[in-house]
Amino acid sequence: MIKELRITNSLTGQKETFEPLAPPFVGMYVCGPTVYSDVHLGNVRTFLSFDVVYRYLLFLGYKVRYVRNITDVGHLVNDADEGEDKIAKKAKLDNLEPMEVVQKYSNGFHDVLRTFNIIPPSIEPSATGHIVEQIDLVQKLLDSGYAYEVNGSVYFDVSKYNTDHDYGILSGRKIEELMDSGRDLDAQDEKKNKIDFAIWKKALPTHIMRWKSPWGEGFPGWHLECTVMSTKYLGEQFDIHGGGMDLKFPHHECEIAQSVGSTGKPPVKYWMHTNMLTVNGQKMSKSLDNSFLPQELFEGKHDLLERAYSPMTVRFFMLQSHYSSTLDFSNDALTAASKGYKKLINGLRIVKNLSYEGNSEVEENSKQIDQINKLIDNCHSAMNDDINTALTIGHLFNLVKKINSIQTKQLSVAELGEACFKNLKSTFVSFVEDVLGLQEEKLEEQEGLLSALIELYQDAKFNKDYEKVDKIRGALKAQGIILKDMKTGIDWAYEE
Ligand code: AMP
Ligand code: ZN
């Protein structure tokens, strides 16, 4: 059994034992969204994966400071140092103030994440709220000699940095290869080398998002904000930095260069990257026009969707893959996820209603106790093994079988003994709800109606009115509810 948490560190490509710099405190930074459009399901996958990392660290008892930023300036349309700012472009297009765009899509982002039961971070700083600190960092990098100013813009000198340090340490890129690829510099270019990146850009007269700086009016480069905000809230060195795989280069590589260039220290102990949600094998992306919004999924309104899927079904679908593998969207997988989710929730409903009742005449069943204890261990081991949610779900399914046996009286709680029963109950509930973040999508206002129907069903059975019995069964089945005739009375479950 794996006793300690191991995570794959993108820096080494190895699974490493997680040892925080200053336990029990853990500092975790995840790159947040650029708030110029609605978040699509691909974005949700990344934030949901880190939600589970956060949840599991809390479950293990760590005191986590989780920082996830909002990018509201500096991210240019082509991800390099050219083109318009994404926010400013959208503001012009919709005739809005840039901050109206930022507010609108930040609100939308929060609404979506809440729907998926993603816990908000401890701090959610924004790039525009940290301009002063970004200017300070630019000055530090100029002072250290790793940056140079040209005509009001400041660039990071990658080759100079690479003579003292290792540019490419995270992504494995080689500076010579980078020099050979892409467009060559022309006469108008201000950079010394094409691999240099802007840390401060001079604002052209038409540029609306601009701030005063020692180099004239301008705006910060995209990579700068994350270095500044992670350092400010987590220190010069912290435990975990995450983001989608597509951010590894250049964004995270540049973050490392900025930190090492200004403090001399590597900023992050464990880099974690999530893999992409794909559609027919292609990354889901707004620019590829293959993305859909969570709302479209909930309503089933998109050409790619055969039906609607609930938020928890989608959450379950995402948890069924490892965060570092690609996950391809498909209706079949979502339909299977809907069944799997209901199986877990049925187990949850049953186990929450069970309580321990000792019986001096019943002997403990050591075989069952061993099996259940093993399954419980497996849940811990799977999560400890690089947050393997897919495997954890498999073990939880096996626990559901045991829970069902208790409900059908094939197995009694007395046979398990108090310790094993309580362990089963608390492990199951905490893994489903706290670690995986799955909630019962309650029928809520329909629950009163459901009990009324169950009462009618019971009366009909008592009166041997089988036509009515079938009718009620059929009507409830059409709503996804299965009636269960138990020795103890009538119960119901979600249809799996
Ligand atoms: P953006 O707002 O484009 O910077 O993206 C926000 C986050 O979503 C980043 O961490 C991206 O890496 C991540 N992301 C973007 N597309 C996908 C996708 N198809 N699958 C998983 N994560 C994605
Ligand atoms: Zn970032």
Image (cartoon, grey):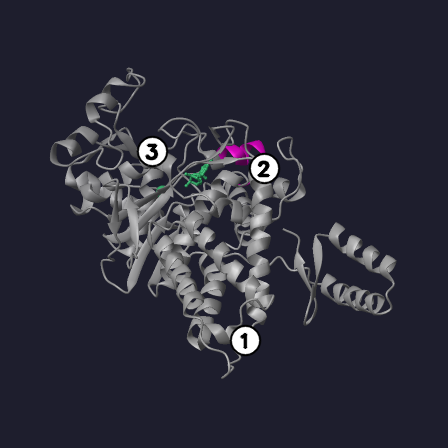
Residue that mark 1 sits on: 355
Q: Secondary structure at mark 2?
A: helix
Mark 3 nearby-residue class (10 Å; few <14, some 14–19, many ≥20): many
Asked whether residue 199 is drawn in magenta, I would say: no
Residue 488 % position (x, y): 68, 72
Q: Say which of 416 and 439 sits in front.
A: 416
Residue that mark 3 sits on: 201
Q: Label 2 to label 3, Cα distance in Å?
A: 47 Å
* Three-letter amino acid code at the position of disc 2: Asp
Residue 207 % position (x, y): 44, 32
* Three-letter amino acid code at the position of disc 1: Ser
Query: Which residue is drawn at the image coordinates 57% and 31% (left, top)?
Result: 93
Residue that mark 2 sits on: 332
Query: Are the residues flagged by discs 1 and 3 in contact, CB closer than 8 Å?
Result: no
Residue 99, above or below 65: above
Q: Secondary structure at mark 1?
A: loop
Q: Looking at the figure, which quarter contains the N terminus?
A: bottom left
Residue 428 % position (x, y): 48, 63
